[in-house]
Image (spheres, rainbow, N blue to C red):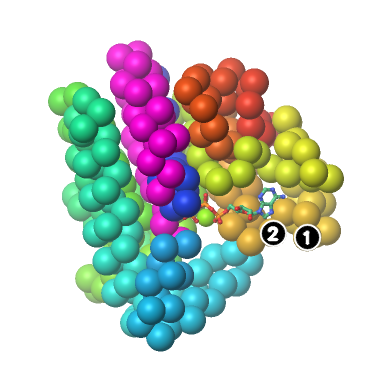
């Protein structure tokens, strides 16, 4: 049974209608594949932060998380988004288990500015999929938020796209699918069906790929470098979308 890692973006995870159809499809696919879900929630973190008087800051599409905002990241991602997703999956018949990156030491990281630095935006330094494998072997569907911790026990916010690619590589996944709120990587108003690394670099340089799409495209090629053969960026648009994305009939397939 091959493993498929699916990363669901925050806005994509809020669309209950398409998410319901996705759950139905996951149930079918789960009979033939081991599935791991990773979710984001960036837009909701920004909204809730604003309510607490914190203005989110981004650098190359990656949130620069202050210690104050880290509390909100924990509440929104490991709390609200993760719980809602697990509940929805369970109602649709999937045996979902919600986890954060801290659970079972799945991923441990370090502040991007180095150990002890103030910013809580982190990068993964250790990954351990033992807990995930125990859950997968027992038939559960793990649902992970990308919040994690550093070696000193402080909370760490890891970009969910990066967390998904690291998990896909470590689990030797056959496919990594990014479900977002756009039908694929867009250039000149249409979805690019197949995107090479060279073309992606040029689109980033020209600002055609920007914001949250930058870490996603970067994570995609990093995953391929680590042996994940199939990486797709797209959207869950209608019933059957996941199969069509996996078959290359929808979304953007990355290649190198
Ligand atoms: N060339 C592009 N093609 C498509 N989307 C792009 C492009 N450049 C920038 N984007 C932006 O990238 C966004 C998707 O990334 P974003 O980080 O916002 O969502 P996500 O990763 O799905 O969710 P989360 O960050 O919550 O995990 C799109 O909504 C779009 O605004
Ligand atoms: Mg994102």
Callout 1: SS = loop
Residue closer to the observer: 105 or 119: 119
- Indicate the quadrant where residue 229 lies: top right
Measure the C-alpha gap from mark 1 to mark 2. 6 Å
- Indicate the quadrant where residue 1 lies: top left
> In the picture, which quadrant includes the C terminus?
top right
Farthest residue in the front direction?
17
Q: Name the residue beneath numbered marker 1.
A: 207
Relative to residue 161, is residue 95 drawn left or right? left
Point 73% across, 31% down: residue: 194
Would the CB of label 1 be found within 8 Å of ligand 1?
no
Q: Name the residue beneath numbered marker 2.
A: 210
Where residue 101 appears, x then y in whole percent?
Answer: 29, 54
Whether the residues at callouts 1 and 2 have beta carbons within 8 Å, the answer is: yes
Span of residues in magenta: 14-42
Residue closer to the observer: 6 or 224: 6
Q: Is residue 37 above or below residue 202?
A: above
Point 63% across, 38% down: residue: 183
- Classify mark 1: residues with Cα within 10 Å, few (<14), some (14-19) or many (20+): few
Q: Is residue 212 above or below residue 72?
A: above
Point 54% across, 65% down: residue: 62
Farthest residue in the left direction?
138
Would the CB of label 2 be found within 8 Å of ligand 1?
yes
Where residue 204 appears, x then y in whole percent?
Answer: 75, 56
- Indicate the quadrant where residue 130 lies: top left
């Amino acid at each position: 049974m091959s493993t498929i890692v699916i990363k669901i973006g925050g806005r994509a995870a809020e669309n209950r209608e398409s998410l319901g159809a996705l759950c139905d499809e996951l149930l079918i696919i789960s009979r033939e594949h081991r599935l791991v879900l990773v979710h984001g929630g960036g837009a909701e973190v920004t909204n809730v932060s604003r309510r607490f008087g914190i203005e989110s800051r981004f650098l190359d599409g990656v949130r620069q998380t202050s210690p104050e905002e880290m509390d909100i990241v924990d509440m929104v991602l490991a709390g609200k988004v993760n719980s809602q997703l697990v509940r929805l999956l369970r109602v649709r018949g999937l045996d979902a288990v919600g986890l954060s990156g801290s659970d079972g030491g799945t991923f441990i990281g370090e502040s991007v500015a180095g150990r002890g630095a103030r910013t809580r935006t982190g990068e993964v330094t250790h990954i351990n999929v033992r807990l995930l494998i125990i859950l997968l072997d027992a038939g559960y569907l793990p649902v992970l938020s990308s919040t994690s911790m550093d070696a000193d026990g402080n909370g760490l916010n890891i970009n969910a796209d990066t967390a998904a690619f690291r998990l896909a590589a470590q689990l030797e996944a056959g496919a990594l699918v990014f479900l977002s709120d756009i039908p694929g990587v867009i250039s000149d108003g249409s979805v690019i069906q197949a995107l090479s690394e060279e073309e992606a670099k040029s689109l980033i340089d020209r600002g055609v790929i920007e914001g949250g799409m930058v870490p996603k495209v970067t994570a995609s090629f990093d995953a391929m470098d680590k042996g994940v053969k199939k990486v797709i960026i797209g959207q869950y648009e209608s019933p059957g979308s996941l199969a069509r994305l996996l078959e290359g009939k929808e979304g953007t397939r990355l290649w190198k």
